[in-house]
Amino acid sequence: MKTGISHYLLDIEGTTCPVSFVTGTLFPYASDQMGAFLERNQHQDRVLKLVEELEEEWKDDPHPEAVALRAEAPDECVPWRVLPYLHWLMAHDRKLTALKELQGMVWEQGYASGELVGPLFSDVPAALRRWRAAGKVLAVYSSGSVKAQQLLYRHSNGGDLGELFSHWFDTRCGQKQTSASYTAIAAAMAVEPDRILFISDTVGELQAATDAGMKVLFSLREGNPQSDPGAFTSIINFNEFCSD
């Protein structure tokens, strides 16, 4: 690696864990459990606030399918009124922050029960520990909520790795293909962008990070939908480079 890197900013899906875990395990689990979760937690302030955010999103959603669902929804303002819209959002992999937070709450129950375990790639746990021991600052930037990020690392197949990370970022700091998001992340970590290495499996995210002044690497993991790194250097696993 180039010298001068002090911070490692890591994507999750397709970078530290398989894409298939999110689409094949986490999303179906949240979809199956969401209705019961809303009913059990209908009096929790945080849940109600997120439901209200989703109601507002639903009112302004111009997609014909979302409009049709809204027309069929019951009039009473109960948390599970938004359930059909939630299922629709999950089926279309919409990146709404309120949705991601609710999913994180549902996944928390699954991790706590042992039904869910974060399947990190085999090289990841040792690499994270190695980088941290070398004095690197580790951070996460994922479209999943901060809660979902922390749950995955704290309940991973490599043990509890949550304490290795110093910073967690989700879409509340901005969209992942917008350079301003990476500028904001660098400011939040109080470090110059060129001292940050961002690793992701998505070329658009790497371009945005590059535009913000970060160093980047393209994660080329088995099963990733995007295999062309474009102009970026690719790595197959984290054993391909050492901390400097």
Image: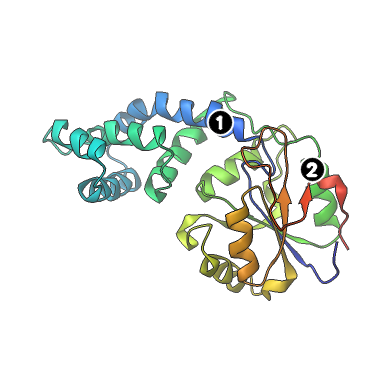
The crowd level at tag 2 (other Cα within 10 Å; few <14, some 14-19, many 20+) is few
Residue 86, image x and y in percent? Answer: 33, 36
- Amino acid beneath label 1: Ala
Q: Look at the numbered disc 1 and give the secondary structure of its residue.
A: helix
Residue in view at x 33 percent, y 33 percent: 88
The numbered mark at residue 38 is none
Q: Look at the numbered disc 2 and give the secondary structure of its residue.
A: loop
Foreground residue, 172 or 224?
A: 224
Disc 1 designates what residue? 112
Image height of 31 relative to 165, above or below: above
Residue in view at x 70 percent, y 50 percent: 229
The crowd level at tag 1 (other Cα within 10 Å; few <14, some 14-19, many 20+) is few
Image height of 80 relative to 195, above or below: above
Report the number of numbered marks: 2
- Amino acid beneath label 2: Ile
Foreground residue, 178 or 8?
A: 178
Residue 93, image x and y in percent? Answer: 44, 39
Disc 2 designates what residue? 236
Residue in view at x 77 percent, y 50 percent: 234
Q: How far is disc 2 from disc 1 in space, using C-alphas?
A: 31 Å
Closer to the chain start, of discs 2 and 1, is: 1
Quadrant of the snapshot with the C terminus = bottom right
Q: Quadrant of residue 187?
A: bottom right
Residue 34, image x and y in percent? Answer: 37, 30
Is 67 on the left-hand or right-hand side of 220? Answer: left
Foreground residue, 65 or 198?
A: 65
Residue 127, image x and y in percent? Answer: 82, 47
